[in-house]
Amino acid sequence: MSFPSSDSTDTRRPVEGLSHSELSAWLDARGLPAYRADQIRGWLFRRRVDSFEAMTDLSRRLRQALAGEFTVGSLSVHRRLESRDGSVKYLFGLHDGGVVETVWIPEPDRVTLCVSTQVGCGLGCTFCATARMGLKRNLTQAEIVDQVLEAQRRCPDGTRISNLVFMGMGEPLANYDATRGALDVITDARSGMGISPRKITVSTVGLLPQMRRLMEETRVNLAISLHSVRDSTRSELMPVNRKYSVSQLLECCRSLPVPRRKRITFEYLLISGVNDLMADAAELAGKLRGIRCKVNLIPFNPHEGSGYSRPKEAVVERFGETLRARGIQTHVRRPRGDDIQAACGQLYHAAEAAPGGALRGVG
């Protein structure tokens, strides 16, 4: 892999960060035919090569020119942790010494990759381990795309990643341009990865202007972290609610251009003694009436310093039954990778990468 140097004199950019039009313009400026862009992207996103030298149907002169201005790959693997349930958490090192986490989740009928969009997160949700880091920086388009490429290269026995969830570190819609650019590459059926938008879900705390843009500009699925329909409770859990209240959020959801065959997913983290009463379930069902949606119930995944706990299984089941009885399509999402701190709300690292690939203070 042509991993970018931390040397500040290396001004090369990851080629994965170029749009098709940007790559075509670069070729045109050198008098090269536009079809070369499809060839290069095919090597990157379909064959997943990790060097320009491997692009054997390009001339040596072109490969050298590409290597002079671009790199292949913006990540390095610092650590791989495997859960007892088969999930794998990758700790990817960034060129500036930062670290980001990505989770590979195998299931009988699919393989899902949970992708990060920021190093840390600045939205301060009290139940989320990532929030303890604060926001370090946004990931680039290339760093988002490369999580998928690096994880795919490491899939066992030719297994292919079939589904993507943008539910890792960070708020995807707070890094809208890079997230949207990555989605363009990932869903491009001609010269990108060719993953169907139907298989991709982007999760948000509820940034209303960006939600609307996402639904207007892409065909991916939308998931919204809700966790309560009472402003007082949701504001305590999620400070963003002080800017966009529950009523504003749900009004926006009712007006979104959601295709007929799709539903908005509301994610509801069940926290013992906070939002898990049957009265909470009844109120939730009432507030969601008229929105084409489904609810994913997520029993809280404990992590150090949270102060919250997971409800008993009977409470989780009763909560779900209450929603279903009121006509709300409901699914209980069971934790995956919680023994390696890879489940929903657990992604966190306490330090950045040390020189030479070791990690200091990683949780």
Image: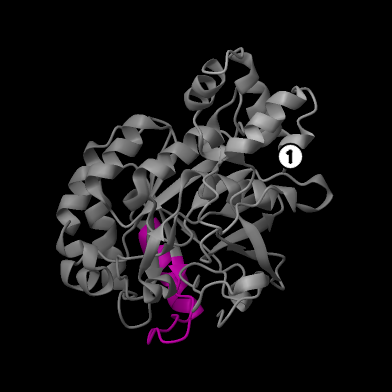
Secondary element under disc 1, as helix, strand or loop, is loop
User: Image check: 195 left or right of 296?
Assistant: right
Q: Which residue is mark 1?
A: 49
Q: Residue at x 33, y 55 (%)?
A: 326
- Toward the front, the furthest residue is 9
Left or right relative to 321: residue 58: right
Q: Position of residue 197 (x, y in %)?
A: 51, 35
Q: Pointer 1: residues within 10 angstroms few (<14), some, or many (20+)?
A: some
Relative horizontal placement of residue 318, taking residue 86 as reference (left or right): left
Up-down: is 290 above or below 56?
below
Which residue is drawn at the image coordinates 31% and 72% (left, top)?
A: 278
- In this orientation, which residue lies closer to the viewer: 219 or 348? 348
Residue type at the position of mark 1: Val
Q: Position of residue 303 (x, y in %)?
A: 48, 82
In the rendered view, would you say 101 is above or below 2?
below
The region drawn magenta spans: 298-324
Q: Position of residue 51 (x, y in %)?
A: 72, 41
What is the x, y in percent for residue 11? 51, 46
Q: Is residue 232 magenta?
A: no
**322 part of magenta stretch:** yes
Which quadrant of the figure contains the C terminus? Answer: bottom right
